[in-house]
């Protein structure tokens, strides 16, 4: 458990003590904390509204952080034009986090090497086999493609697990969500062709600027598109990927498929980690999406009808770089 105690003048830090600054997700220098705005360290709009309320006490939990605050009543001789607050922050930490992170990294490196070697071996062997027998060539290609597909599945699993096993330190920048969406679609280009799926985009003409980590947003898009592709049965299908503004305050992102849909009895279970009815499925895609969305105060909604399809909608409040998201 890591803990930090702050005394605030309005929302400005005038005292800090503790070890919560050692958490990777925060990583602020305690000697430089004095004079900073508390929202340069913590990133929740709900916390902002609570601290800006000068009266009352509150306990508030966001992810692994617990915030406890109360107003301070100072001596009448001091400046009482400002609101002073005592803020205690606790964080449940996992001592195995660094081990998990190292393990994921150490597994992904040889997987990348194995994938490269398999591709090279496929080219080397298949060229010789084609001269002998077309059937042998096609069989070898099928086997090699299956191996590569399974390696890619393991990589996706490890990439998703990192969002569950640790606090990710975000690399926050202003970026165009449309470009991240298009980059994600390009990754699935071959899969979409193989399954004869038509992916339709409905994006606004203007840029959709968002302040955050493009890698995390791409992970959301990756998981939603993967789910839609897996939901489509048969030899053709359609996915609609839409991005739009809501009152210039929020961004709406939806991925809609004409797939098999989700049974009502399963809708309440699909956010449980490793719950899946898909053959070869991992069951953590939507869990990861929800965990990432919490960092941005985003929401997720699912509409699904068996036999007709599923629409997943993500709502993100538009952020500016005043907050460290």
Image (cartoon, helix red, strand yellow):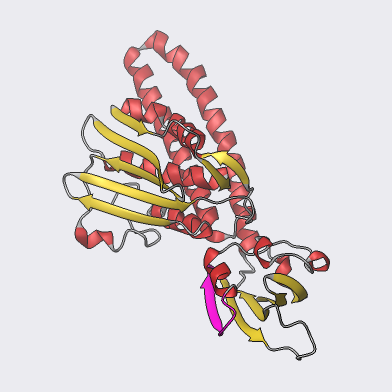
Q: Residue placed at 36% from the left, 39% from the top? A: 242
Using the image as rendered, state which of residue 258 and residue 248 is in the foreground.
248
Tell me if residue 143 can be seen.
no
Name the quadrant containing residue 239. top left
Coordinates of residue 93 in the picture (x, y in percent): 62, 70
Which residues, given as a range, are shown in magenta?
53-64
Which residue occupies the extreme left position in the image? 307
Query: Where is residue 97 drawn, in percent x and y?
Result: 62, 63
Judge left or right: residue 176 versus residue 300: right
Residue 92 screen position, x and y as percent: 60, 73
Residue most extreme to the right:
31
* Among the 4 quarters of the image, the one containing residue 113: top right
Q: Residue at x 64, y 76 (%)?
A: 89
The residue drawn where x is 33% and y is 26% is 194
> Can I make out residue 167 in this image?
yes
Left or right: residue 131 compared with residue 267? right
**Picture coordinates of residue 238, whole percent (x, y):** 26, 33
Name above or below for residue 79 compared with residue 118.
Answer: below
């Amino acid at each position: 458990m890591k803990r930090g105690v702050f005394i605030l003048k309005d929302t400005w830090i005038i005292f800090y003590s503790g070890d919560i600054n050692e958490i990777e997700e925060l990583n602020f220098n305690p000697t430089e904390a004095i004079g900073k705005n508390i929202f340069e360290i913590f990133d929740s709009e709900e916390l902002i509204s609570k601290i800006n309320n000068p009266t009352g006490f509150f306990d508030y939990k966001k992810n692994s952080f617990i915030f406890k605050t109360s107003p301070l009543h100072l001596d009448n001789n001091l400046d009482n034009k400002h609101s002073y607050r005592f803020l205690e922050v606790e964080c449940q930490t996992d001592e195995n986090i660094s081990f998990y992170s190292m393990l994921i990294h150490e597994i992904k490196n040889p997987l990348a090497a194995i994938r490269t070697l398999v591709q090279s071996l496929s080219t080397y062997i298949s060229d010789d086999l084609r001269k002998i027998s077309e059937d042998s060539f096609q069989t070898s290609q099928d086997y090699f493609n299956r191996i590569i597909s399974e390696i890619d599945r393991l990589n996706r699993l490890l990439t998703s697990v990192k969002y569950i096993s640790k606090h990710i330190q975000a690399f926050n920048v202003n970026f165009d969500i449309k470009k991240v969406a298009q980059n994600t679609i390009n990754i699935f280009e071959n899969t979409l062709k193989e399954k004869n799926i038509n992916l339709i985009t409905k994006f606004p003409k203007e840029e959709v600027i968002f302040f955050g980590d493009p890698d995390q947003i791409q992970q959301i898009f990756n998981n939603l598109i993967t789910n839609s592709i897996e939901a489509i049965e048969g030899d053709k299908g359609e996915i609609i990927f839409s991005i739009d503004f809501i009152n210039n305050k929020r961004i709406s992102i939806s991925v809609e498929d004409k797939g098999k849909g989700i049974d009502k009895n399963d809708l309440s279970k699909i956010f449980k980690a490793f719950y899946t009815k898909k053959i070869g499925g991992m069951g953590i895609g939507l869990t990861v999406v929800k965990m990432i969305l919490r960092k941005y105060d985003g929401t997720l909604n699912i509409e699904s009808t068996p036999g007709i399809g599923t629409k997943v909608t993500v709502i993100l409040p538009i952020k500016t770089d005043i907050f460290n998201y």
